[in-house]
Image: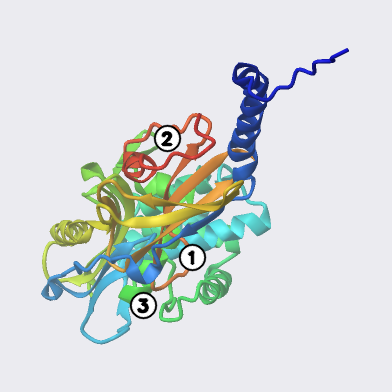
Amino acid sequence: MVIKIKTLKGNSAFLKEFYKPIVALVILMVLITYYVLAPASPKIIATLSEDEMPSQNVAVELNCARATALSIGTAEGGLAKKCEQRENQKLSIASISKIITALVFLKHTQSNEIELNTKIQLTPADVAISARYKSELQSATIDVYVGQEITYNQLLEGMLIASAGNFAQILVNHAFGGFNEYKKAAETYLSESKLSNTIIGKDPDGIGDDTLSTANDLFELGKLAMTQETIREITTSAKFTLEGNVYENTNELIDQGFTGIKTGTNYVSGDCLLFSYKVTKFGRTYNAIGVILHANAQRFDVAKEMLRELEKSIQEVEVVKEGETVGSISYSSPLGEITQELVAKSAVKVPLAQNESVRFDVATDIAKKQITYAFRLSTAESAENIAELSATVNLESCALPANSFFAHFEHITGVYTHPWCY
C-alpha cells in the first residue's frame, strides 16, 4: 500500500495565497509602528543660533538742535535715541509734573480705597487757591465756586486735559491732606520706580521751575503713564466738559493720532512735551514714547519729526534665507533614528526696531500633536521676550492659522511631511 503525502513544496500558487495575508499583516504592523509609535517622543532642535540671527542696524537720528533735551523710543524696546546738552541734565519740566501727580494719586487710591467717581465739595480754601493760580501765578485755571461738587476723575481731567494748575492743587489737598503729604508719597513713588533724577519741587503742577527731570527719566515716566488705563483715556481725549463748559486739550496733536501724554510751558522751561503714539509698520505695532524739553522750535513739529525718524528705523530684516536649514526633527523608527530637516523654501522676514534682536525656536506638544515655530524678540536692555511672532501647526490637518504674517511659516513647514500629517 502506497501512501502519498502531498507537500507544499513546489506548489507556488498555494504558497502565494498562504503568505499574502502574513506579508500584509507584517507591513501593516510596520506602518502602525512607524506612523503611530515613532513620533511619540520626537526631539526637535532649532539649528539657527541667536548669534546667527541678524539684528536691525538702522539707528534713529534726531536733530539735537531742536531742544535742550530730546529722547524717543518704544515702550517695548526701550530708549532708541536721546540728545542732552549734558548727560542726565536735570531740567524744569513745567506741567509734565502733573503726570507725576496723576500717577502718585492713582497709586494712593489703591491703598486708601478712594474711588475716582467720589464727589468732593469745594471749600473757600479751594476757591482761594484757584483765584491765586489765576491772578497771581497766571496759570491755566478752571473757575470754581464754594459748595461745588466735583469728582476726583473730573479733577484729573481738568488737570491733564486743560492743564488746570488749581485742579492739581485741589486734588492733592483733598486726597493727601496737603502738599507736604503728597510730596512724601511722590518721592517714595519715584524711588520705587527708579527715577532717581526726578525731583519734586514746591508744587504739584509745575508752575514753578523747581520740579526737575531728565530726558531718560521722563521716557520711563511716559511708559509708566501709558500702563494706566485712566491716564490713557484722559490724555487721548480732545476735550472735556464740566457743568456745561467745554475745555480743550492743550496737546494739539491729539486729533492727529497721538495718544497723549502732556504738554508743559512756563517762563523757565519754555515749551515741553511728553508724547505717545502707536506706530504700525510691517504688521507690528510699537508704542512710541517721546520727550521734548525746552524746545527751540515748535514742539509739535519736533514731535512729528522725531516719530518719522523712529518709524524710518523700523526695518523688515531677513532672518531666514531661502534654502536655509532652520531646525531638525529626530525620532525613533523601526529602521532606527530618523532625522528630517526643516528647510526654508523662501526667505522669512521679521520687522525689528532699533536695539531689537531675534532668535528662532521650534517646539512640539505631543499630546496635542502640534509643532510651534516662533521668532522671539528681545533687546539688549532686557533678556525677556518683548514680542513673539509664532505659528502653531496642527499635525493632524497640517494647517497654519489664518493670519497674514504667519504665511511666512509656510515657507518652513511646507517642505516637511510629518508622520502625523495624514
Write the residue at 33% across / 77% down.
Answer: 214
Determine which quarter of the picture holds residue 375.
bottom left
Determine which quarter of the picture holds residue 257.
top left
Between the C-alphas of marks 1 and 2, the distance is 26 Å
Q: Secondary structure at mark 3?
A: strand
- Residue 67 coordinates in the image, percent (x, y): 17, 73
Q: Judge whether 67 appears above or below 102 on screen.
A: below
Sequence order check, earlier mark of 3 and 1 = 3
Q: Which mark is residue 13?
A: none
The amino acid marked with disc number 2 is: Leu
- Residue 292 coordinates in the image, percent (x, y): 24, 67
Q: Nearer the viewer, mark 2 or mark 3?
A: 2
List the residue tagged with mark 1: 384
List the residue tagged with mark 2: 400
The amino acid marked with disc number 3 is: Leu
Q: Which is more toward the observer, 131 or 254?
A: 254
Image-based side of 388 in relation to 275, left or right:
right
